[in-house]
Amino acid sequence: MKSDFQELRLNVEWRLKRRARRVSAIADVPSDCNAVFFTVDDPIARNQVFPFYLYSSKLRQAYGIRFCELDWRCLQAEEKPAAVFPRVQWVCLQTWFDLSGQQIEFLLERINQIFPNARINYFDWFAPLDLRYAGRLQGWIHRYYKKQVLRDVEDYRRPHQGDTNLTDYYSRRFGLDMPVTMQEPVDDRFFSDKLLLGPSFYLAPYLISRFSRPMPVHTRKFDVHARIAIAGEPWYSRMRQEAKTALGALQHRRVIQDGRVSRSQFMREVEASTLCFSPFGYGEICWRDFEAIACGAVLVKPDVGHIRMDPDLLLAEETYAAVRWDLADFRDTVEQLLGDESRRSIMAARAFEAVYQYLSSQRFVDQVQWLFTADPLYEAVDKDAAPHRATPVRL
C-alpha cells in the first residue's frame, strides 16, 4: 500500500509540474526560462524527461535551471521564427527516429534562429544502442545524452546488418536478409567530449515508489516469470520466439508466460516469482530488468557485458544471471539458480541495493551537470554569482 500511495503521489506531482511548465507554442516560452525541452510524446521518451521534473528544485539550486517543455514538432510547424529568445541558454531536443539528415539540420538551424545564445543537448531516447544521428549532430550540439552505450566504441564504426548490433547478430543467426548499414562517422572527440550517460528505466514513478520501501522478501509461488510478446519485425519475432521456445524446457516448473496483463497485475506476478526472465527487446535494456529487481526477483537475461551504463547496475553474477545470446545455457542456469537459495538471495539483494543507493543519493543532479556546463574543463565558481559547475562525469 505504501508503494502504491508513493507512486500515485509521484504521478500527481509529475503531472502538475508538467502542466505548469508545458507550453503549446514557441511564442509562449516564459520570459524567466533559461532552458527549453523539446520532447516526444512516447512513454520511453517521457521517462528520460521525468527526472528533470522530479529534481527540478535541486537543478535550479545547483545550476540555475528554469525550464519549460514543448512538443518537438513545434520546431517543424514554425514557417519562420515568430520570436527570438536570447535569454535561453540551453535547448534539450528529442526527436523521432525516422528523420533524414536534412530534417535534423533543419531543426538545428531553426533552434539557432530562435535561441541564438543557446547550446543544444540532444536527448537520444531510442531503445537500440545506435547513434544514428550522432554524425550529423556532432558539429552542432553541446552534449549527446543517452541511457547506455557500447563499451567498445569501435563497434559503432563497423558495418552492421540493420541498424544495431542486435539486428546484426540476429539477422545473421536466423539467416535474414537485412541491408548492411554504416552509421555516419563520429570522431573521437564525440565520445570524449560530447557523449553523456544518463539514467536508465529505473527513474520512473512506479519504480521509484517500489525502491522507497524494503525489498520484498517472502515465499514465492512461481518459479519463473516470463510473459513474452512475439509480434514485431522479423529479426525481433524470431529472437523472441526462440526465448519462448527455451521456456518449453521448464515444463516441470511453475512458469508464467502467456497473455498480456495490466502493469499492476504484472508487477504482482513478478513479486510472487523467484526468477524473472527478460529477453532482449529492440534494445538490450528494458523496463522488465528493473521491474524484476524492484520486486526482489532474480533477473535472468542475455549477457549485457558489452554495455556501459552510469551507474553500471547490471553486472553478471552480481546483480543478474547472464545467459548466452543463443540461450544454450538457459535451462541449466535456471535450474542452478532455483536450487541455490543463498546465491539467489545475495544476487537479488545486491541488485536492489545498487538501485536504491542511486535513488537515495539523488545522484542524478550531479550526473547531468555536464549538460549545463559550457566547457568540459572548468573551475568551480560561486553558485550565488553564476550557475554552479562541478567536475563532469566522463566515459
Image (cartoon, helix red, strand yellow):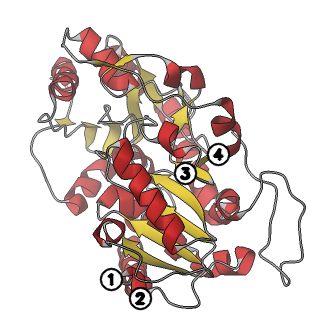
Tell me how far mark 3 sits from mark 1, CA to CA.
24 Å
Q: Position of residue 173 (x, y in %)?
A: 26, 10
Q: Which residue is mark 1?
A: 24
Tell me how far mark 2 sits from mark 3, CA to CA.
26 Å
Q: Which residue is mark 3?
A: 145
Please tell me which of labels 4 and 3 falls first in the chain.
3
Q: Quadrant of residue 383?
A: bottom right
State the residue in front, 51 or 318: 51
Q: Position of residue 359 (x, y in %)?
A: 59, 62
Q: Residues within 10 Å of mark 4 (few under 14, many from 20)?
A: many
Q: Which residue is mark 4?
A: 194
Tell me how far mark 2 sits from mark 4, CA to CA.
30 Å
The relative height of residue 393 versus residue 382 in the rendered view (above or below) is: above
Tag 2–tag 4 contact (CB < 8 Å): no
**Label 1: which secondary element:** loop
Tell me how far mark 2 sits from mark 1, CA to CA.
7 Å
Residue at figure coordinates x 60%, y 69% from the top left: 90
State the residue in front, 132 or 259: 132
Residue type at mark 1?
Answer: Ser
Tag 2–tag 1 contact (CB < 8 Å): yes
**Label 2: which secondary element:** helix
Quarter containing the N terminus: bottom left
What is the tally of numbered marks visible in this picture?
4
Q: Which residue is mark 2?
A: 28
In this picture, residue 302 sits left or right of residue 203: left
**Label 3: which secondary element:** strand
Mark 3 or mark 1, whichever is nearer to me: 1
Residue type at mark 2?
Answer: Asp
